[in-house]
């Protein structure tokens, strides 16, 4: 070991790999603290918190859980605003859906590098494994992350280090390269064996990573949003709302967000002051938010759809309260839209999937 | 010892944790922060963050639809 205790900042996603990477380096006497980035697209406990039926399951923030298991501090950084540039203009393009994995990793490493310098730390750790992810974790893209983030050879990937050129922490003896690993490929077995050796249990193993942008349906909803607005932009509320409710677009300028159960109702209620919204009053039913400018005819259709998803769907007539944004509430008596008139293509996942396919082709 | 209240209502986790963290970074050891949130996840996440960051949770409870967490800032503030 070198004369003074070295300090490393570890990117902690909440998954197993970054947890192991941090632990492996801690084992060598290095002081490690964690950093976790919130992009707004993170798949975290909160989506479960919204839906009531998921509430029985224990909720937790996985990154915090990891930090607690490791006994390290965790710094959570809000990068929602800055992340827009990464998602909207990725230098290296997208993966399978709208996931800009290579630009994303580079951006996070760059932010960690800034933090490292500000706080007097010596190097950065990630849980990247060679060949694990098709876009960002490849032999030819590892140097891209190190170069474009500016971190250079202060980036240590303990789980694959033995397969990579020695980094400065290894060359200077801050860590012993011999006690690092040579994991590669998509198999999870070596990680699981190492986890067992450390006694880690109940760690998160999200399929497809921890980011909604790798999710086909989510990406399609986002593509629909951009297309309908005629510009690629979003704010935090937009991207949170895409995780909640049924999203139907019966007319190009008119999207309805329909709560599926009580937990979603409660969540959407928080948006009542910012959106035109409807709710059935003669029968129990969901809260419906309207995204877009709705005229009287649009509101009538929205009311019939709200009635369709209410307990009054079979009734001849349902009373709906509509509250236009900045306007007076009004009551409408409507005939619920028959199921046969709710067209499959209104569901924005379907419309967005077509847009994504065309974008990929062209 | 200063006492402050942080309104983290209508924010989804991890935002209440981030706001708590950023607020505490500007407080001194011994100060007390009361956080109010509506995401039920905050009831677990804020105390978890306090444990890893060296702050003491004086109270964590549900109050109607709100979550209230009262924290005494520890020596590790400013991180």
Image (tube, coloured by chain):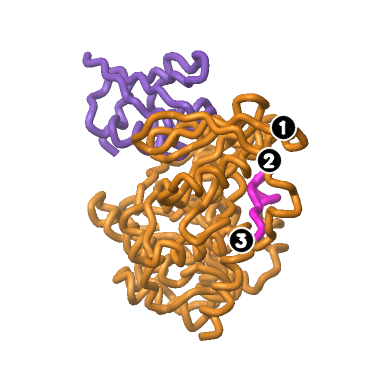
Chain colours: A orange, B purple
Q: Nearer the viewer, residue B44 or A272?
A: A272
- Mark 1 sits on what residue? A312
Prevailing secondary structure of the magenta residues: loop
In whole angstroms, how far apart are the C-alphas of marks 1 and 3? 26 Å
Q: Residue at x 45, y 41 (%)?
A: A72
Quadrant showing the N terminus of chain A:
bottom left
Q: Nearer the viewer, residue A61 or A334?
A: A334
Q: Earlier in the sequence, mark 1 or mark 2?
A: 1
Q: Nearer the viewer, residue A221 or A322?
A: A322
How busy is the neighbourhood of tag 1: few (under 14 within 10 Å), some, or many (20 plus)? many
As drawn, B3 above or below A252: above
Q: Residue at x 62, y 48 (%)?
A: A246
Secondary structure found at label 3: helix
Residue range highlighted in magenta: A195-207
Secondary structure found at label 1: loop
- Mark 3 sits on what residue? A349
- Across and down, in percent, residue A354 comes to 60, 72
Chain letter of the residue beneath label 2 in the structure image: A
Q: Residue furthest bottom?
A: A362
- Across and down, in percent, residue A239 comes to 46, 52
Q: In this rendering, would B22 be left or right of A15?
A: left
Q: Is residue A13 magenta?
A: no
- Mark 2 sits on what residue? A336
How busy is the neighbourhood of tag 3: few (under 14 within 10 Å), some, or many (20 plus)? many
Q: In this rendering, would B25 be left or right of A324?
A: left
Secondary structure found at label 2: loop
């Amino acid at each position: 070991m070198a004369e003074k205790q070295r300090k490393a900042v570890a990117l902690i996603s909440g998954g197993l790999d970054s947890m192991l990477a941090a632990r492996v380096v801690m084992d060598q006497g290095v002081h490690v603290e964690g950093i976790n980035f919130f992009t707004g697209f993170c798949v975290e406990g909160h989506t479960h918190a919204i839906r009531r039926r998921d509430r029985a399951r224990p909720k937790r923030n996985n990154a915090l859980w990891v930090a607690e298991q490791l006994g390290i501090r965790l710094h959570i950084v809000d990068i929602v605003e800055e992340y827009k540039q990464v998602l909207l203009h990725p230098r290296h393009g997208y993966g399978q859906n709208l996931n800009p994995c290579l630009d994303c990793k580079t951006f996070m490493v760059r932010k960690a590098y800034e933090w490292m310098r500000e706080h007097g730390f010596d190097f950065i750790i990630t849980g990247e494994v060679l060949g694990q992810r098709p876009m960002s974790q490849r032999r030819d893209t590892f140097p891209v992350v190190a170069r474009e983030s500016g971190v250079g050879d202060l980036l240590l990937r303990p789980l694959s280090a033995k397969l990579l050129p020695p980094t400065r922490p290894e060359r200077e003896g801050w860590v012993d390269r011999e006690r690092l690993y040579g994991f590669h490929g998509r198999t999870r077995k070596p990680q699981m064996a190492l986890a067992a050796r450390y006694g880690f249990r109940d760690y998160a193993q999200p399929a497809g990573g921890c980011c909604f942008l790798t999710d086909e349906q989510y990406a399609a909803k986002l593509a629909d949003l951009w297309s309908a607005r005629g510009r690629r932009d979003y704010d935090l509320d937009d991207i949170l709302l895409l995780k909640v409710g049924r999203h139907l677009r019966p007319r190009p300028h008119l999207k309805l967000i329909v709560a599926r159960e009580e937990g979603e109702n409660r969540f959407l209620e928080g948006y009542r002051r910012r959106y035109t919204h409807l709710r059935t009053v003669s029968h129990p039913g969901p809260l419906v938010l309207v995204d877009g400018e709705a005229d009287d005819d649009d509101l009538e259709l929205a009311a019939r759809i709200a009635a369709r998803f209410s307990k009054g769907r079979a009734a001849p007539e349902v009373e709906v309260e509509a509250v236009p944004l900045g306007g007076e509430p009004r009551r409408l008596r409507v005939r619920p839209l028959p199921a046969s008139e709710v067209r499959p293509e209104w569901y924005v996942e379907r419309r967005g999937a077509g847009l994504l396919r065309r974008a990929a082709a062209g | 010892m200063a006492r402050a209240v942080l309104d983290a209502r209508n924010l989804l986790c991890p935002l209440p944790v981030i706001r708590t963290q950023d607020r505490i970074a500007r407080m001194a050891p011994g100060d007390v922060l009361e956080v109010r949130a509506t995401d039920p996840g905050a009831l677990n996440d804020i105390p978890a963050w306090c444990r890893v960051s060296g702050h003491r949770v004086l109270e964590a409870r549900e109050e109607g639809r709100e979550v209230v967490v009262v924290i005494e800032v520890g020596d590790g503030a400013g991180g």
